[in-house]
Structure formats: C-alpha cells, structure tokens
Image: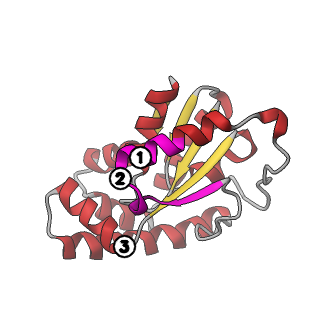
Amino acid sequence: MLITVSGPPGSGKSTNAAGLAEALGLDHVSGGDIFREMAADRGMTPVEFNEHAEDDGDIDRDLDRRLREIATTSEAVVLESRLAGWLAGDHADLRFWFDAPVAVRAERIADREDKPVSQAREETLRREASERKRYLEYYDVDIDDLSIYDAAYNTARWGPDRFLEALVSTVEAYDPDDDEGKVPIEGVSYDF
C-alpha cells in the first residue's frame, strides 16, 4: 500500500506519517527530512534554503524527482511531503492532507525548533508563499487545491494519540474492491 501525507509546515505530517507507517508495518519516507538535510549540507536554515530554491530550480526538482521515484517504485510506504499526493499521482492508494490553524502550527514549530512563536509564524508564512509560487511555476500544481485528496484533516481538533487511532482506522477500513472514487491527477507537469 502506498499512502501519501501532505500538508503545510507544522500540520503534523511527520509525526502522524511516522506513526501510521509504524502501526501498519510500512516504511516512512519524509520529504521534509530530505529537504532539511539538503539545507544543512549547504549551511542554510530550511527557510533560507526554501528562498534560495526560488532562484535555483534544481533544488526542488532534485527532491521531487527522488520522491516521485519512490512513489512510482514502492508499494509499502507512507510518503510524506507537501507535494506527496501530487507527486505520487495515481500510484497512491490513499492521499491525505493534514492542516491546522497557523497559530497552532507556529507553536508546534517553535517548540520543535526552540524559537519564539512569532519567528516561527513569520518563517512559516514566508516558506508557504515561496513553495506555493514554485509549485505553480514548476509543475502547474496549485497546492491549495485539495480536490485530489481522499481526506483532509484539521489535526488540531484531536489529541495526537486519538488522531492516529482515527487515521489507522480509516486506512484499515479501506477496501480497494469497493473504491469508486479515486480522483485522477491531471494537468501536472513532472518536469524534473
């Protein structure tokens, strides 16, 4: 089974994708981890690297090429990134979108990265604007279009354990033989 988890920074993608993979016995691949490693290799913060990527299209294309390859060749993985649902396309069995109010996401990021909430919020909004611009330019993907996702969740509505339980139950209830509603991915330019 290939499951994708997408959403903005601080939405709970990594935590829940890792928990879901563990609960289901699947591998977990995080685009965010790969991106942060690429930034660190260049001595930049993720925000600086994100903005640098606006001038160097090879950064996104390299990351996205790797994620697309995983999505098209793997069968037992939870693939997690902002674009995972779009990159996996029709290869994904289930595509999830996670979100939370920006105030909640900024607090989560501030706790994780040990920085002031105001700084986390400002950096998050800058990062989202940068990514939105690049995804549209590179791949004709409107990241705000959630129509391709099988379910979209506001992760701030449940505690972490209860949300993961609900997510696992959702996946376990899925039966491909009863699936009449998979939304095809159309109009995307996988220009890597």
Residue 65 in the figure: left or right of residue 123: right
Can you tell which of label 1 and label 3 is closer to the viewer? 1
Q: Which residue sits at x=22%, y=52%?
A: 43
How far from the left and from the top, in percent, is residue 108? 27, 60
Marks 2/3: CA distance?
A: 17 Å
Instruction: Tell me how the rendering is colored.
Output: secondary structure
Question: Going from the N terminus, do you reach mark 2 or mark 3 first?
Answer: 3
| Image: magenta residue range | 151-167
Which quadrant holds the N terminus?
top right
How far from the left and from the top, in percent, is residue 13? 43, 50
Q: Residues within 10 Å of mark 2 (few under 14, many from 20)?
A: few
Label 1 sits on what residue type?
A: Arg
Q: Main secondary structure of the magenta part?
A: helix
How far from the left and from the top, in percent, is residue 121? 28, 73
Q: Residue at label 1?
A: 162
**Above-or-below relation of 43 to 52:** above
Is residue 66 among the parts visible in the rendering? no
Nearest the viewer among 79 and 23 is 23
Residue 62 in the figure: left or right of residue 16: right
Label 3 sits on what residue type?
A: Val
Disc number placed over residue 159 in the picture, else none: 2
Q: Residues within 10 Å of mark 3 (few under 14, many from 20)?
A: some
Question: Going from the N terminus, do you reach mark 1 or mark 3 first?
Answer: 3
Nearest the viewer among 86 and 35 is 86
Q: Are marks 1 and 2 in contact (CB under 8 Å)?
A: yes
Marks 1/2: CA distance?
A: 5 Å
Circle 3: element type = helix
Q: Are marks 1 and 3 in contact (CB under 8 Å)?
A: no
Q: Which residue sits at x=59%, y=71%?
A: 144
Q: Residue at label 3?
A: 102
